[in-house]
Image (tube, rainbow, N blue to C red):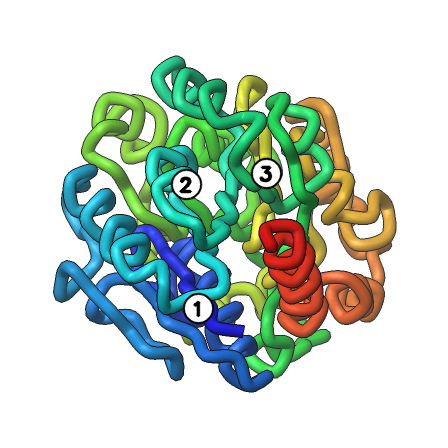
Amino acid sequence: MKIALVSTLWEPASHTSTGGTGAFVGYLAEELVNRGHDVTLFASGNSKTSAKLESVTDTHFVNGFSDPLEYLNIANAFRQSEKFDIIHCNNLSRSLVFSDLTKTPSIHLLDYGEFFDHEKKVIEKYKDTANFVTISKAMQNLIDVDWQGYVYHGIDLKRFPFNENKEDYLLFLARLTPQKGPDVAIRIAKKLGMKLILAGKKLPTDKKYLSEKVDPFIDGDQIKYMGEAEFDTKVKLFQNARCLLHPLAKNYIEAFGITLIEAMACGTPVISFNRGAIPEVIEDKKTGFIVETEEGMIDAVKNIDKISKEDCRKRVEENFTVEKMTDGYEKLYSNIIQKNK
């Protein structure tokens, strides 16, 4: 198949990307190429891929964001639509406005558990005509559109070596935003008297929240902030952590959570609040704990040694590999192309 993969410019598309979408698209592009497909990747110029790379910007957005450049990147793919059998868009609702401007079929991935009013308006317009895909069952229940299916994220297990010997620290690895709950992770670590490592991007829009609920408690000793971890550093953090904390805000719907499978692949259990797709990813009391309260998360940390590290790895091997993910997308592509003839 001749496939156009359109990524976001928020992060480079590569398995080494620090962002979920960039990593997912990077993995998918690589495996599709390995399987003999003709893949063109529309992403930032600093993406690393074996696919043909087309870019409208040399690097991904670092300290800002540009919707015009995002639309320019999407338009670049649709302008060349006659070259492709299918266009796979990973830009939330932005790509929908191009979906009926070409005869080439396209799929549109909705992979974020929160929709603003203006996004809902666009989705509503195309809900019965565009091909929508998502990354969990939970997301299909979140919004009413013509879903073509869902495909779980997958990772290359060779890049996440299993490690049975853990150090005595808790890990929080995500954007440091209210939705992800780094302040909750800090409170839990302090109540337990345990070391906590925070790793992830800080956004200017969260400056007030960070200055009040996160930054004052970072002391470089018990509570340590490492910034946005590069890939090799991230893997080491996952390998050595006692467990990964995923304390999502009450109003946040987790669409999937690629860091959860990265941690489990390394043999590290995950503790998360019960939000969205969490029960689809974590097997409660076997690869981690799904809890409802902070007190429940504290109790889970105290009982984390009851979780088998081997079971964590096995969970990913059986459900969340790049091979399984690519199988799912190949099937979707074929079905949609056939339907469009």
Q: CA distance from mark 1 to mark 2?
A: 23 Å
The type of residue carrying mark 3 is Ala
The 10 Å Cα crowd at callout 2, few under 14, some 14 to 19, many 20 or more, is many
Which numbered marker is on residue 26?
1
Q: Is residue 222 among what the camera can see?
A: no
Q: Residue at x 32, y 44 (%)?
A: 219
Q: Amino acid at mark 2?
A: Ser
Vertical order, 100 against 87 (above or below): above
Question: Which residue is found at the position 57% from the left and 54% from the top?
Answer: 258
Tell me if 258 is positioned left or right of 59 in this view. right
Task: Residue 252: name its quadrant.
Answer: top right
Residue that label 3 marks: 255
Label 3 sits on a secondary structure element that is loop
In the visual, does 199 lie left or right of 245?
Answer: left
What's the CA distance linking mark 3 and mark 1? 19 Å
Residue 171, percent across and down?
53, 52
> Where does the image place residue 25, in percent across and percent down from the top left?
46, 62
